[in-house]
Image (spheres, rainbow, N blue to C red):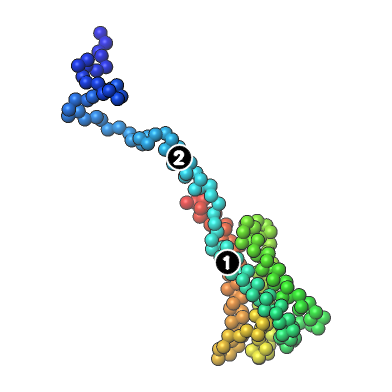
Amino acid sequence: MRQPLFHPDQPIDSGSGLPIPPAGHVEPDRDDSLAGGVDSVVRFESEKDQESSQPPRYLFSRISVILIMLMWVSAGFFKVSDMSGFVDTVTQHRVLPESMMPFLWWVGPGELVMGLLLVFVIGSELRKPFGKFVLLVSMGAIGGFIYYLLQVDPVVLQESGCGCLSDYRIASGMENSVRFFAIGRNVILILLHLVALFGPAISDRVRRSG
């Protein structure tokens, strides 16, 4: 004979229709992982998927590009505002042949254009071929300028300046200070280019391994 699910004399809860357990009754442990309902579990998993699918910011790489862009814009602005002074400074260096002197008038505008292109690299072009190409051209130009500085006579460079930022110079009693500060500044810029170029790939690798 089948036993009833609950004793007929056991009181019934009017709200749920289930029997009220007697005093002192202890229910066995149960899994509360779904206590909030299936919807809460699905929502939690969805939030985790959204966090993992968000594109990385590449913060350090973008900051590096911003600093490089500011360098190009400031250098181009100073040259454009005093083109005759820049051409005169380069003429005193006696490194470039006379046939290249007319092209010096395009250096300042070219630097401003480079700064403008780097604005796009800061955005969505950082990891794309166009962004990498712009960064490589920028780094190559800075490397070429370092080579140019090494060709200038130290005494002439100390007296005339490098022409990087108009006639701006750092006051220092150190010998060859103009060459030292100019090359040091450009080496730092090259390091910033390396961060901008290889930083996203390193960030992606760390993100996948994590």
The residue sitting at 44% across, 41% down in the picture is 44
- Closer to us: 76 or 187: 76
Q: Are marks 2 and 1 in contact (CB under 8 Å)?
A: no
Q: Is residue 9 left or right of residue 180?
A: left
Q: Residues within 10 Å of mark 2 (few under 14, many from 20)?
A: few
Q: Residue furthest right?
A: 99
The residue pinned by badge 1 equals: 64
The residue pinned by badge 2 equals: 43
**48 shown above or below 145:** above
Which amino acid does the dot numbered 1 rest on? Answer: Ser
Q: CA distance from mark 2 to mark 1?
A: 38 Å
Please tell me whether mark 2 or mark 1 is closer to you in this view. Answer: 2
Which amino acid does the dot numbered 2 rest on? Answer: Arg
Where in the figure is residue 13, as x and y percent of width and height? Answer: 26, 23
Kind of element beneath mark 2: helix
Q: Residue furthest front?
A: 14
Which badge, 2 or 1, comes first in the chain's sequence?
Answer: 2
Number of disc labels: 2
Where in the figure is residue 154, as x and y percent of width and height? Answer: 65, 88
Which quadrant: the N terminus?
top left
Q: Is residue 72 left or right of residue 30?
A: right
Where in the figure is residue 74, as x and y percent of width and height? Answer: 64, 75
